[in-house]
Image (cartoon, helix red, strand yellow):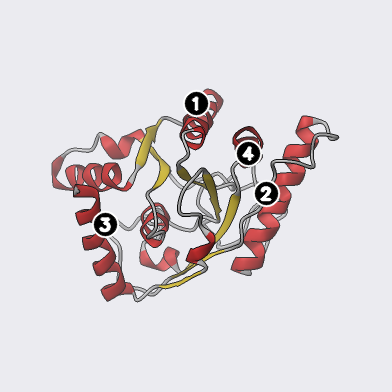
Amino acid sequence: MFYGALRQTVSVLARTLCRPTVEGRENVPADGAVLLASNHLSFIDSVIIPLSVTQRRVRFLAKSDYFEGTGIKGRVTKTVFSSLGAMPVQRRDARGAMLSLEMMLERLNEGEACVIYPEGTRSRDGRLYRGRTGVALLAMESKAPVVPVAVAGTQDVQPVGASMPRPRPYSIRFGEPLDFSTGYDHLAPGKARREITDRIMDSIHALSGQERAKGYNSLGADE
């Protein structure tokens, strides 16, 4: 009940202040496991994407720091993230990243919807970076369809360093689901993961129209 009330409140605020454009929401299955693979421009993406999927709850990973803050802002952040389906994780090293994937795979195997950012962190320059293959590992292990997602304008809603969102327009597009449950058994595991990841990134690019970077995002975004 609290989730529904909070979602409704935040959704009304977002529609009133930001006037978002949402396309392709119907491409997200109403039930069953699904992986939403999105580009990543702002901290606020992890709030906007779950709110835009009105037919079901969506899980996402968030730094454990967001659940440990103090004061009014800390309590509000913890309440909002917990209610919207965030899963607290520590991703300071390779082991932490693997634990994050294991946690998400467990949720997918339980039939839930999860958001993942294949670039690994926010893009500070607006370009779309090469995807890391964890998204392919999840798709192959869970057999869940992958829905490519493209957000735009969220870097203006909450730029890096901004403590609160701003009333700026943004858009989000959901592409058609991609099925990777078959067709890759003839490839070595590493090559299969790379090909699947590249196909997912191509689909995100087709939705976002971003300039593409040649390599991985190594700039960091304090996430």
**Circle 1: element type:** helix
Q: Which mark is residue 78?
A: none
Residue 152, position as x, y percentages in the image: 50, 68
Residue 1, position as x, y percentages in the image: 19, 48
Nearer to us of marks 3 and 1 is 3
Task: Give the residue type at disc 4.
Answer: Lys
Q: Earlier in the sequence, mark 2 or mark 4?
A: 4
Give the residue at mark 4: 143
Contact (Cβ within 8 Å) of mark 4 with mark 1: no
Contact (Cβ within 8 Å) of mark 2 with mark 4: no
Q: Give the class, few, some or many, for how many residues have Cα within 10 Å of label 3's Cα (few <14, many ≥20).
A: many
Q: Is residue 188 left or right of residue 24?
A: right
- Which residue appears at 67% of the width and 60% of the height? 203
**Circle 2: element type:** loop
Q: Is residue 217 visible?
A: yes
Q: Which mark is residue 179?
A: 2
Task: Give the residue type at disc 1.
Answer: Leu
- Which residue appears at 27% of the width and 74% of the height? 17
Q: Nearer the viewer, residue 95 or 199?
A: 199
205 versus 103 height, above or below: below
Nearer to us of marks 1 and 2 is 2
Q: Nearer the viewer, residue 30 or 89?
A: 30
Q: CA distance from mark 4 to mark 3?
A: 29 Å
Q: Quadrant of the C terminus?
A: top left
Q: CA distance from mark 2 to mark 4?
A: 8 Å
Give the residue at mark 1: 99
Q: CA distance from mark 3 to mark 2?
A: 30 Å
Give the residue at mark 3: 7
- Which residue appears at 24% of the width and 54% of the height? 4
Residue 122, position as x, y percentages in the image: 50, 52
Q: Give the class, few, some or many, for how many residues have Cα within 10 Å of label 1's Cα (few <14, many ≥20).
A: some
